[in-house]
Amino acid sequence: MTGAASGVGRAVAAQLVENPEVTRVIGIDERRGDVDGVEWRIVDVRDTSVAQRIARCDVVVHLDLDVSPDSEPRRRSERNVRAAQTILTASAAAGVPRVVIATSAMVYGAAPDNPVPLDEDAPLRARPEGVVADLLEIEWLARRAPRAHPGLSVTVVRPAMLVGPGIDTFLTRHFEAARLLVIRGSRPHWQFCHVDDLVSALVWAVLGKVEGAVTVGCEGYLEQEEVESLIGLPRLELPEGLALGAAERLHRLGLTPAPASDLAYVSHPWVVSSAKLRAAGWRPTYDNVTACQVLAREVAGRHAALGRRFGKRETATLGAAGATVALLGTAAVVRRARRRRSRGTT
C-alpha cells in the first residue's frame, strides 16, 4: 500500500492488519508509519525500484495522492500522475494481479443535466482543470493499464465529497466561508462520503468483493437549504457570470487555489449510487445528515473563500465576512484596472 503512513492510507492499513483474510501488509511511504503489524518500505512511490518492494504481493493499493488546495499546482500534478504511472507499471512488472486506486466522483463532472444518481459506468465529463485534471489522467492510466499489461486488473474507487478528520479540499473549504456561495438559479445536490466509509469500501475492493469502477457515498442527497441549516450559515447568492468571472480572475492572479470550473461542484448534481458496493452487501455507516454534521464540526473556526484560507491576521482585522468581501473585491478592482489600461487611461 502506498501512502500508508498517514491519512486514508494509514486508516486502510490499520483495517487490513486486523483483517483475518489478510496475511501481510507492506506499507510504502517516504517515512515510517506508526501502524503496528505493517512491514514498512521507505521509498518514493515515483521511484521505479518500487517494483522490487511489491514483488509477490496479491494486491497493490495506491493511496499516495495529493489533493491539497495549498500544493503548488504543477508539482502536485506531476507527482500525482507520475506516482500512478509508476505504480501501475511496477505492479505489472512485479507480476501483481490487481491494483486498487482511489480517485473521486468529481471525474464525472457536475452538470445540471446529470442523472441523479449517476451510474458507475457513466461517461467522465469533468473539465480537466486543477486537481480534477490529475484525477482524469489517473483514470486514463487505470483504464489503459489492463490493455497494456494483460493479466493486470485495476479497481478504481470514486468517493463522493469526502468529509471527516484530516480532510482538507476545495470542497470542504467551501464550508469555511462566512456565507455559503450559491450561484443564482442553480440547485446543488449535496452528497457526502465520510472517510470511514471510504476506508471500508477500499477494504472491500482489496478483498476482491467489487471490481472495475466503484462509487461510494451516503445514500441520496441533501438540498441546499438543508445543508445551510445543518452548517448554520446563511447563503451568499451571486449571478453566475459574476461568480465565475471573479473566481477566474482570482485564480489567474494566484490568489485562490481552485479554477473557476470547480464552482460547478457546489452548484450542480454529481450524486453517485454506490451500486456495486451495495450489491456486494456493503452499507455506509454515515448518512448525509450525520456526515454534514461532522463537516460542520471540522470546519468550525476556520475561514476561507473560493478555496483560499484566511490567516488569523486577516480575519482579526476584517472579520470573516470582510475578508471574503475584500477577496471578491480584488477581482473587481483588477477588472476595472484592465479596462482602464485597454482604453489607454489611468
Image (cartoon, rainbow, N blue to C red):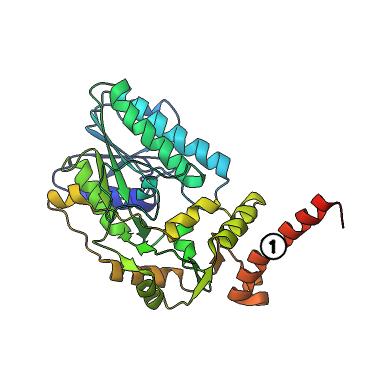
The mark total stands at 1
Q: Which residue, given by chain and number where applicable, does mark 1 sit on?
A: 332
329 left or right of 49 in image: right
Q: Residue at x 35, y 49 (%)?
A: 105
| Figure check: 99 above or below 11 | above
Residue 218: horizontal and vertical position, in percent? 26, 61
In the image: residue 123, left or right of residue 266: left
Q: Amino acid at mark 1?
A: Ala
Image coordinates of residue 175 in percent, x first then y, are 46, 67
Q: Is residue 215 above or below residue 294?
A: above
- Locate residue 256 relative to residue 269 in the image: left or right: right
Q: Camera-side residue: 167 or 292?
A: 292
Residue 64 is at least partly visible in this image? yes
Q: Image quadrant for the N terminus?
A: top left
Callout 1: SS: helix
Where, by quadrant of the figure, is residue 247 drawn?
bottom right
Q: Is residue 169 visible?
A: no
Figure quadrant of the C terminus: bottom right
Label 1 Cα neighbours within 10 Å, binned few <14 / some 14-19 / many ≥20:
some
Tell which of 111 and 85 is nearer to you. Answer: 111
Q: Nearer the viewer, residue 271 or 114?
A: 114
Q: Position of residue 80 (x, y in %)?
A: 46, 39
* In the image, residue 139 above or below residue 227: above
Kindly identify the residue that appears in the image at 71 percent across and 57 percent down: 335
Where is residue 206 drawn, in percent x and y?
22, 42
